[in-house]
Every structure is written in C-alpha cells, then in structure tokens.
Image (tube, rainbow, N blue to C red):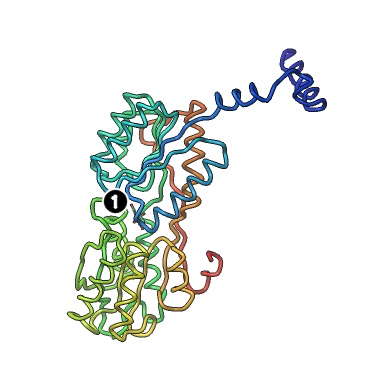
Amino acid sequence: MKMKKMLAILLAFCMLFGMAACGNSGESEGEGETAETKTVGVCIYKFDDAFMTTYRNALEAILKEKGYEVTVVDGNNDQAKQTEQINTFITQGVDALIINPVMTSAAAQMIATVKEADIPTVLINREPTADEMAVFEKLVYVGCDAAQSGTYQGELILETANQGDINGDGKISYIMIQGDPENIDAKLRTEYSVKALTDAGKTVEELDLQRGDWDRNKGQEIAANDLAKFGDQIEVVFCNNDDMAVGALQSIKAAGRVVGEDIYLVGVDALAAALDCVAAGEMTGTVLNDAEGQAAKAVECMEGLLAGDTYAAGEQSVYVDYVKVTPENVGDFM
Ligand code: BGC
C-alpha cells in the first residue's frame, strides 16, 4: 500500500516536471511501450464476404485503437490455408488469436492446436459445439444465437398485411436461399424462419431450397431460376443473409415482380445495401447481425482471457442480440 502511494506521488511529480526531469529518455520510453504491446493474430474465413468485411474492419479498428499490434489474414475459404496461418501465428508467438473458422467441422482440430500452444483464443461467427470447446478453458466463442435470426425472419413475414399468404390460397409458398449449410447460421436460419410460420399455425409450402453460399451472385441466379420455374406461386423469398437477398432482389425486379405487393423478401445482417432496400420498400425486412457489437464483445473477451479469465465447459458461447429491422425502424440503423 505504502509503496503504491509513493509510486503515485513519483508519477505525479514526473507528469508535472516532464519526463526529462525524471531521467527518462525518449528512447527508454519507446522500449517500455514495445515491451507492453500485445500482438493479436486474426484469421478471417475469407475477405470476400460482405458481412465479414464489415466485421473485420470493425475488429481491426477496435484492436488498433486499443494499441494492439494486429495482423489480419485471409483464409480464402480454404481450411488447409487457415490451419497454416494459425500455425504461423503460433510460431510467431502471438499473445492472442481471434479466429473465424473456414470449416466448423475443423474446429476440434483447431482447438486442440491452440490448446497445445496455450494461446488464449476467441472464435467468432462460426460456432462449434459446446463439447468441442470444453477441452480448452482459455477459449470462448462470440457470436449470435442463429435460431433467433431465423425466428425474426419468420415474424417479419407474419407481420405483413396478409401474413405471407399473398394469393389467399391458405398456404405460404416460399423459396429458401441458403448460406453454406456447413455453417450453423445457415442451418438454424433455414429451420427457424419456417418454424416461426408453422408455430403460428400457418401451412407452408417449400417450392425450392438451394445453397447460395452467402454469395450475392448465387442469390441472384437461384432467384432467377426459381422465378422462371414457379412464377406467381412464389410468395416469399427467404435468404439466409442480405448479400443473397440483394442479389435475389435484382432477379425479382427483372421478373417484373414488386416486393411488398406480390412477393416478400427477407434477409439477415443489415448490410448498408440491404438497409437502403428496406427503406425503399424493396425488401420486406432484415435482421441486424451486429458486426460492431460482436467485434467489441470479441475484443472484450480477448482482453478478459489475457487478464487470466477462464471459461467453464458449457459456458463458452457469448451471444450478442439480433434485432428485427423493418421499414418503420430502419432509420435507427442507417
Ligand atoms: C452472415 C453471413 C456471412 C456468414 C459468414 C453469417 O452470420 O449472416 O452474411 O456470410 O456469417 O460465415
């Protein structure tokens, strides 16, 4: 206690009379800073993903602002490449890792690797199982509860004037444009968007389900084919993310269909492009997948781990809430 007080007085003295008066040259000050700078390796599954671009930019900005030395690498959607990148970070001796896995199925191996190297690790965006995470107490997953986003998509349809049954035939006929099905977000959004409808007592008809791998061009292609094949039968276009929804919208317009009048369209993420569409009435709605919020939470958890936090088995998933975005509240997100 006494020692601390003395140090505080000394510090105050230094601040008053300048560092030179305390014999602290600029050089040694610089050395002090270097010694304290922590290094963070960030692995992103691929840079060419609209949502992960927003996320990674937010993450990098927060880490840099907090004074970390950050290296962000592109996995190019190639798990072998990402595994190599993780190994390189470990060899370089980074203090912490933040990893957006390419393949959720590779998580167990990845976790074994970081555990062996004893590096505090935050996994983001692609959630492994609780059992896989349980083997390493310095590991946490930061993301969202994907089921919630699916439920919100279904609710967006139930909130429309005719509750999704545009032609009044007693059933909601939809197409589902899915993300990469290896990813739990894709699985749960697909399941829970429809479940919200059936839970509300609605009859549903799935006209088509295709994987669009989170990709705008694929979303456009799938929607174009389905619109040609099923025409007016399609009442709802569910897209597991906004980038595919923005692609689907191009095909919807090209087919002469009008969102909000003869078809409904929903996505997830609240990308800037999708918010514009919602505001213009060209998308029925979307769901905020809070990139900034998740980036901030990931850094907070990383700092906790660096300070010695550990996570008990079964408590290694930290969720940030999704938020429903409609034409009424879209202004709050722009
Ligand atoms: C997002 C998608 C993104 C995917 C990447 C999802 O949570 O909604 O837009 O492509 O994560 O893993």
When the figure is inspected, residue 248 is found, relative to residue 12, above or below; the finding is below
Residue 65 screen position, x and y as percent:
57, 42
Q: Residue at x 41, y 66 (%)?
A: 286
Q: What residue sits right under mark 1 in the picture?
A: 184
Mark 1 Cβ inside 8 Å of ligand 1: no
Name the image quarter holding residue 71: top left
When the figure is inspected, residue 157 is found, relative to residue 183, above or below; the finding is below
Residue 50 screen position, x and y as percent:
38, 59
When the figure is inspected, residue 106 is found, relative to residue 190, above or below; the finding is above
In the image, taking residue 69 as reference, residue 195 lies left or right, namely left
Amino acid type assigned to the residue bearing label 1 in the image? Ile
Name the image quarter holding residue 142: top left
Q: Residue at x 40, y 35 (%)?
A: 97
Q: Residue at x 37, y 24 (%)?
A: 118
- Crowding near the residue tagged with mark 1, few <14, some 14–19, many ≥20 C-alpha atoms within 10 Å: many
Q: Residue furthest top?
A: 2
Q: Residue at x 51, y 69 (%)?
A: 330
The mark total stands at 1
Question: For ligand 1, which image quadrant applies?
Answer: bottom left
In the image, taking residue 30 as reference, residue 181 lies left or right, namely left
Q: Residue furthest left?
A: 229
Residue 103 screen position, x and y as percent:
26, 45
Image quadrant occupied by the N terminus: top right
In the image, taking residue 33 as reference, residue 168 lies left or right, namely left
Residue 176 or residue 113, whichever sits in front:
113
Residue 4 screen position, x and y as percent:
72, 17
Name the image quarter holding residue 93: top left
Residue 84 or residue 246, whichever sits in front:
84
What secondary structure is found at the residue carrying circle 1?
helix
When the figure is inspected, residue 71 is found, relative to residue 9, above or below; the finding is below
